[in-house]
Amino acid sequence: MTQGNVKKTRRQRREKLLPTIDSPADLKKLSIDQLPKLAQEIRDAICDQVSKTGGHLAPNLGVVEMTIAMHYVFDFSYDRLLFDVGHQCYPHKLLTGRRHLLPKLRTREGMAGFPDPHESDYDLFSVGHAGTSIPTGVGMARGDTLLGEGDRNVVALIGDASIVNGVAMEGLNNAGTLERQFLVMLNDNGMSIATPKGALAGYFDRVRISATYEEFKKRAREVLKRMPYGDALEEIYGTMGDMMKAAFHRGHMFEQFGLMCIGPVDGHDLPALVDMLEEVKDFGRPILLHCKTVKGKGFEFSTGDPTAFHSPKPFTVEGCRVEAKKGGRSFTAAYADAMIDVMGRDDKVFAVTAAMPDGTGLNKIMPAFPDRSLDTGICESHAMDMCAGMVKSGLKPFFAVYSTFVQRALDQVFQEVALHGLPVRVCMDRAGYVGGDGAVHHGFMDISMFSVFPKAALLAACDEPTLRAGLEFMRQYEDGPSFIRYPRDDVPADPIESDAPPFELGKAHLLRRGRKRRPDLAILAYGIMVYETLAALEELDQQGYDVELYDARFAKPVDIDLLRDLVDREIAVLTIEDHALAGGFGANVLEACNDARLSTDRIHRMGMPMRWVYQDSRAEQLGSVGLDAAGIARRVRTILDTSGAEPIDTPSTPDIRVNASHVDLPRRDTGTPRA
Amino acid sequence: MTQGNVKKTRRQRREKLLPTIDSPADLKKLSIDQLPKLAQEIRDAICDQVSKTGGHLAPNLGVVEMTIAMHYVFDFSYDRLLFDVGHQCYPHKLLTGRRHLLPKLRTREGMAGFPDPHESDYDLFSVGHAGTSIPTGVGMARGDTLLGEGDRNVVALIGDASIVNGVAMEGLNNAGTLERQFLVMLNDNGMSIATPKGALAGYFDRVRISATYEEFKKRAREVLKRMPYGDALEEIYGTMGDMMKAAFHRGHMFEQFGLMCIGPVDGHDLPALVDMLEEVKDFGRPILLHCKTVKGKGFEFSTGDPTAFHSPKPFTVEGCRVEAKKGGRSFTAAYADAMIDVMGRDDKVFAVTAAMPDGTGLNKIMPAFPDRSLDTGICESHAMDMCAGMVKSGLKPFFAVYSTFVQRALDQVFQEVALHGLPVRVCMDRAGYVGGDGAVHHGFMDISMFSVFPKAALLAACDEPTLRAGLEFMRQYEDGPSFIRYPRDDVPADPIESDAPPFELGKAHLLRRGRKRRPDLAILAYGIMVYETLAALEELDQQGYDVELYDARFAKPVDIDLLRDLVDREIAVLTIEDHALAGGFGANVLEACNDARLSTDRIHRMGMPMRWVYQDSRAEQLGSVGLDAAGIARRVRTILDTSGAEPIDTPSTPDIRVNASHVDLPRRDTGTPRA
């Protein structure tokens, strides 16, 4: 593989195929024999880039041939290609005129790590959550047909871990009722993110080719070649189905959903894939092509440890060793260690993840407590219900989940958890802006979702000691569900208090008293914003402002006694959070004060504004909306110097993604002003 | 069947079995031969009651035998019985000591229409949303086993429309990995709510008994009788699986999920069911028993039209005619007619429901526009994604869904709809308190869920003219998703304006000007609360209060110009909504004012308080939290007479369900005070 900036001769460069591909039209000019070479160049480009900047590696290496074959056979300037999860979109982007965006992968000026309609009309949906390609594809298939464009073929790409997600299975069940072309490309690598844990994973293992692809082709071609459309299709479909089943294996699972199933076939055999797709391309019924692929294909380190190379940080290859560039200690790592302590103290505690053992720290917990930990696979709805059942049985489940993915379990939190006052503990990693993963992964609405539930306790950790104290509070809190949030970031290396005092329900914690009895301003910072505020205070102190600082700790219930005291003493208050302003911690403060008939005239709020923020570093994202030290200092000065008559949302950067690659469909996602 | 108060002789009464059943222990004293008679008595009792008060009829009649058989074989004072959706729980309640609650079915003092842990320890979860019995059961199975009580058998009852719901399929996939007893009782009536629309519905139709139950029994008994536990089970499981497949049909769908599947069997053959359950009772692997039942079994009118008798209003049987007691014109009916008009004007409009054609009015729309309407079955997540795809194709989908069920689609609204600014139109029926269905069905969080999304427009209709105007606004609104809410209630017979002026984004509508230039109070009523307020004003007018009334129309964006004007003129403001106070319309008003640096000192809020409200009439529920005319008048007087220093939540009734039947497990779900 290519590493770094290996110099190439002019001749070598001339021979390269990838630089000649500015759109899928250029791809179609190549002969089938040239495609494997193109695949290798795409692999090299991706490995090279991810080693420098980090990004999704193994998923992309696994689908290079499938992507080339799909673009070679279909015309996605007219046909519809839907991605699922979407972290396997790099080859697709390289083939659709976005090579030039690769060097700035996952930054504001560069290529998004997920499909993105802002970048290209070839991307239909920004995705990042699993299972949506089939249901959105069903909608497009129905829509196109109804609008007289039923000849637009629809192709939904989906992985084996994703296809067993609830919305995907609902989609399959509905796809089976379509009476038109609809192709599901199943990318079965046996471990889409981590190893899938459901029973169907075993099913995929059992499904094996019992006859060769060549055998199938010989028989199927005879049928397909003379295929009439219309009524006769029904009969031929039956015949074909029988033949294929006989040729391959008996009774593919998804045939029960009404799809004709073909495969499994080798997802890396380019000529065979192209041949197969040519044959099924215009088949007028829902069909599933089961492709077996190797995650990380073509990069030996990656195939050896595909989970580690799912989405690595920058790394270097030194001979036969791969060295990941070291980062600091993450909140995720701190969570794992804190949970191991909690589980050592309390044998009722049970740790759950939904397919994110690495991302949530469960990979460290599971070996320590194999009987009291479980990875359910990608199914947050089921996982939340399972936790509710576990509480009923007497366990104390802690469900570690990304803030953005727990959105999938809102209704379960309502009916099975909160309505029964069950103390399910939800630990929300990646709260706030998440950096390179961009808008599909921000944890921006966990407070607004869960504040509506009686007895729900909403907490935040700002550093490792508060994370430990928060988890201990949750272990003991039995009156209802509890939710703690922490960012995709390193824990502060030098915490304010190395041993945080215990959390008390609804009580904020004074971190720094003002100099005067009546300071200029009291800041109630929620979670990690405590540390951004501390940084801002260095500057503000020097400028002579007298600011008191509280770690708010609870977004629900908020500390109404503290608020009453501050309001009564006519001290201005500023709430700061890396959560949406709408329905967030500050909003809860306003509601609580209004309920208690406390004036909110001196209360100000900072948080994530009412607009989408796209991929970039987390620091850049926070800075762009003023949630960094500089922005906080600026805001404090504005409040104290102008009696707070400032506009709410003063981003230091424009709120539209500037992207040179997309001129056809300029979209303004600036958000309506919050009203 | 028994109808009304047919007089019975003393002797007839003595012979009755049902009055002797105070708990499942009494049931077990009966002989198998007596069970069919008991089944008939249960049917009679349910028909009799539902004809008087309304309630779920056909679902309960369909599961009488299954319920008796389960209680006869298992001991659910120790074993675990999980209901799904739960509207089929009446026979279960009659067998578990709750006969005396039946006469006040679906009221505060009577029997809840859904399972309810407040009533009895035999009910594990309050349910009403589909698909949860399997995932919660998986949690209990894992929990019990881990805590050394793995001998507690777990039984999850689920219908054929519910089992294809996403969370149920996720649960099945995980159930397949259990290495212990786990029984799924599939109640396949071919039409769990309306006719299921997915491909699996066809699958269920295809699954037919290819050998008799007796044949199965003969073979299976030989194996089961000498069944050792432990390692040998694996082999026997395989053998049994093969035998059963051979005996019944080939390759049951759910075997792919790792469950052994038996059936279909006749779900009304009590002796056979008991025999079958005895045999599989302690089988140490996940197993699915596929029971074919007839929805409405035993009541001829109900089997003839099970959809109409799914949850009828009170009715009378006159000879061979059934007469439903007529109600007024519902918002649902008004929606259907309004949509038919919209669809007549705009051929891009597409109407969608997720298994609720009757409840949403689609049953009237679908015959009028068969090509532009669709029932997806119970799969709100898929339906929302499908709508997103349809918008991408150029259609204007209107998704009619209960407010409580759209909670299932929050993440799809986020990623596939709002993130892309797609104008999916969501029409939320049954917003606010829903009456007899109780806490599992209230629409209390649609505003707090969706207010966080840029460009989302949140509307409410207060009567038929505003519903029409609101839908027309949504048809034209293309900047993002729009959401309209309306209650489970009749439209006001005498609307304030027979032709409501068009909706303008973020603009409230003045309905009644105050007498003075600066009235005592301005009420901003959201949706149907307009009419409760109008009723309150009759009283307040007489008492000399000068109140101005606005139809708020939009919860997002709120009318900041109006608010500025009112605040500047120092007029007190009261917001009223039948939505949770937390994150609701009033909360959005507070946030908007704070952002605009308008004082909220004179702003007051009324809405649904932070506690669960249980089954009763909608009017009683509204009254119990002060959201009726009397409560509004009371609140207005308090604000104007005491400068608003009143407590926020002053229910006129206690907030705990008083229920004589449950003494073992008193639960206080009073909610923590909103803080």
Image (cartoon, coloured by chain):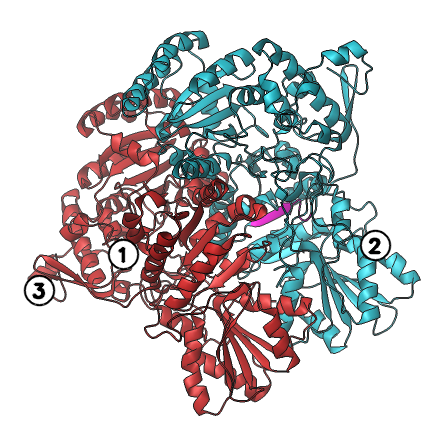
Chain colours: A red, B cyan
Question: Where's the N terminus of chain B, which quadrant?
Answer: top right
Q: Which residue is the site of mark 1?
A: A311
In-image side of B67 versus A101 (left or right): right
Amino acid, disc 2? Ala
- Left or right, A36 with respect to A124, comes to left
Residue A607 is situated, as x and y percent measured from the top left of the image, at 50, 70
Instruction: Tell me whether circle 1 and circle 2 mark residues in contact (CB < 8 Å).
Output: no
Q: Quadrant of the C terminus of chain B?
A: bottom right
How far apart are the alpha carbons under marks 1 and 2?
60 Å
Left or right placement of residue A253 versus residue B126 in this view:
left
Label 2: element kind: helix
Q: Are marks 3 and 2 on the same chain?
A: no
Q: Which mark is residue A8?
A: 3
| Same-chain check, marks 1 and 2 | no
Q: Earlier in the sequence, mark 3 or mark 1?
A: 3
Q: Residue at x 14, y 65 (%)?
A: A4
